[in-house]
Image: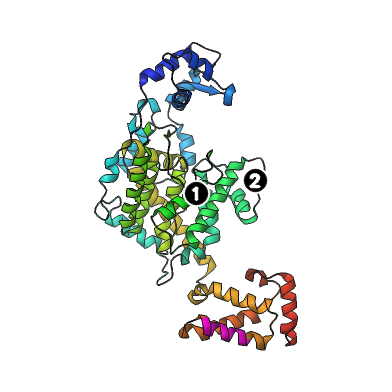
């Protein structure tokens, strides 16, 4: 279990800082502290005091100094956030239960007023798949109704692929926003669609969003193979954490060191063997859950609570919550309009109280918002042709082969007939042949790029197609 910081240890440091009104460096504190402690331990204690508002850090790196907070700073730490500020961020008016409101009152207190706690293994051990339920039957039925877009008998990932362009932007932006990323929606759109980073922004913010995009594509493109297993979750973390962690070997690897949670009294597990054991248990439990919504909420609760990775745990939980939705062609969850403070409080409640009420309220509300969003997106796209969608890759290949082969109509017809004979089942051959020939007839300078054909290739083919002779 993680070590709980002793008040005497913190008070000793606080006393040294108090004796230096103009500020004191880490080295000076280390020299004055008796008995002495390792530098890393001292820095951890200083961070805990700063997070609690008991001391104030000024400057960075070796030049950083610590001093006592001013009267105004101390008062601000004790006082709750102004009602107007909370109202502006939570304009979406998430409906909260009485239990959730009480939980918010507790986690909104200063850190010093909340009880230090360690990881409670019983919280995971006591969960029995398909017996223990975070969501009631009524709640699960409601979510199933709002999240089902009627993609019956379609391969995994069909719905997510249809709305992928919108999903990449929505989920990348909102998940990054919940981490404090300052990119706007338009900034995110330009970065994802054009590869243009916003001027004057931290490079790490752009990296976070690009990592989200890559991680979502990984889940959608491998919809059949993903699941709650080590392959999926470790690689998901590896993609989300790329170029964001100090240790280049940390992405995709379980944690081997202790970590602290800013502005929380929660101390996660530190022993690597226990982290590994609980991680495997968490995945095995999630994989056994039959209901996709219960499965998603379970992962959003238990994965950040375990903190299996050096960092980026909540991002992994938000994207992995979408695994059952992608696989079953349900509406994805992209956290549209979720207030950051509300989500943070919900996660803190899990960390410090093992209570899921607030996170459950946020989850249900967020899923309703996301489902409504993608129902509208899908309506604007129109109903997809299931046959065309099923054979999208094959159609692209055949059309490109005809163009690059500079085939005239006769040669193209023979090529398509031969291709479908070799690659498609009897029932699909005639319909695919008609679709491919129609596509070739409709090809023009304004639509050939979607087949990854170069302008020079199109020009050569168009002449042969028009002349009726093969070049």
Cα distance between the residues tagged 2 and 1: 24 Å
User: Of helix, strand and loop, which one carries label 2?
Assistant: loop
Q: Is residue 217 left or right of residue 9?
A: right
Q: Which residues are magenta?
A: 413-422
Q: Please provide percent x and percent y for residue 63.
A: 59, 22
Q: Who comes first in sequence, dot 2 or dot 1? A: 2
Q: Identify the residue position indicated by label 1 in the image.
A: 238
Residues 426 and 213: in front is 426
Q: Quadrant of residue 460?
A: bottom right
Q: Is residue 66 left or right of residue 93?
A: right
Q: Please provide percent x and percent y for residue 235.
A: 47, 52
The residue lying at 43 percent from left, 34 percent from top is 259
Residues 376 and 354: in front is 354
Residues 213 and 346: in front is 213
What crowding class fits label 2: few (fewer than 14 Cα within 10 Å), some (14-19), or many (20 or more)?
some
Residues 361 and 443: in front is 443
Q: Quadrant of residue 353?
A: top left
Any mark on residue 195, and which?
none
User: Of helix, strand and loop, which one carries label 1?
Assistant: helix
Q: What secondary structure is the stretch in magenta mostly built from? A: helix
The colour scheme is rainbow
Q: Is residue 377 left or right of residue 128?
A: right
Residue 326 vs 76, above or below: the answer is: below
Q: Identify the residue position indicated by label 2 in the image.
A: 198
């Amino acid at each position: 279990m993680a070590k709980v910081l002793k008040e005497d240890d913190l008070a000793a440091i606080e006393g040294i800082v108090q004796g230096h009104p103009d500020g004191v460096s880490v080295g000076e504190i280390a020299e004055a502290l008796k008995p002495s402690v390792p530098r890393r331990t001292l820095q951890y204690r200083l961070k805990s005091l700063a997070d609690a508002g008991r001391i104030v850090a000024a400057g960075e790196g070796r030049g950083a100094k610590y001093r006592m907070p001013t009267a105004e700073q101390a008062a601000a730490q004790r006082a709750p956030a102004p009602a107007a500020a909370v109202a502006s961020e939570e304009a979406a008016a998430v409906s909260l239960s009485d239990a959730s409101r009480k939980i918010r009152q507790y986690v909104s207190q200063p850190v010093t007023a909340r009880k230090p706690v360690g990881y409670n293994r019983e919280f995971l051990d006591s969960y029995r798949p398909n017996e223990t339920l975070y969501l009631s039957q009524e709640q699960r039925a409601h979510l199933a109704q709002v999240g089902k877009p009627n993609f019956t008998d379609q391969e995994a990932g069909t719905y997510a692929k249809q709305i992928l362009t919108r999903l990449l932007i929505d989920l990348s932006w909102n998940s990054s926003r919940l981490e404090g990323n300052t990119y706007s929606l338009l900034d995110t759109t330009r970065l994802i669609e054009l590869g243009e980073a916003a001027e004057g922004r931290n490079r790490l913010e752009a990296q976070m969003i690009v990592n989200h995009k890559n991680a979502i594509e990984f889940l959608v493109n491998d919809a059949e193979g993903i699941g709650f297993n080590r392959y999926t979750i470790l690689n998901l973390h590896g993609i989300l954490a790329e170029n964001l962690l100090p240790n280049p070997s940390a992405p995709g690897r379980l944690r081997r060191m202790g970590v602290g949670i800013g502005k929380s009294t929660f101390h996660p597990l530190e022993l690597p063997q226990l982290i590994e054991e609980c991680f495997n248990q968490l995945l095995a439990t999630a994989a056994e859950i039959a209901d996709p919504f219960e499965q998603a909420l379970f992962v959003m609760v238990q994965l950040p609570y375990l903190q299996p990775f050096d960092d980026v745990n909540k991002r992994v939980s938000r994207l992995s919550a979408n695994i059952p939705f992608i696989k079953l062609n349900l509406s994805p969850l992209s956290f549209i309009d979720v207030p950051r403070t509300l989500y943070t409080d919900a996660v803190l409640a899990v960390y410090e109280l093992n209570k899921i009420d607030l996170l459950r309220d946020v989850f249900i509300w967020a899923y309703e918002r996301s489902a409504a969003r993608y129902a509208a997106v899908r309506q604007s796209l129109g109903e997809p042709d299931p046959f065309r969608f099923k054979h999208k890759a094959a159609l692209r290949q055949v059309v490109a082969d005809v163009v690059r082969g500079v085939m005239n109509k006769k040669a193209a017809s023979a090529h398509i007939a031969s291709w479908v004979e070799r690659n498609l089942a009897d029932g699909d051959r005639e319909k695919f042949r008609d679709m491919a020939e129609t596509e070739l007839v409709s090809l023009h300078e304004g639509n050939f790029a979607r087949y990854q054909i170069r302008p020079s290739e199109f020009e050569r083919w168009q002449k042969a197609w028009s002349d009726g002779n093969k070049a």
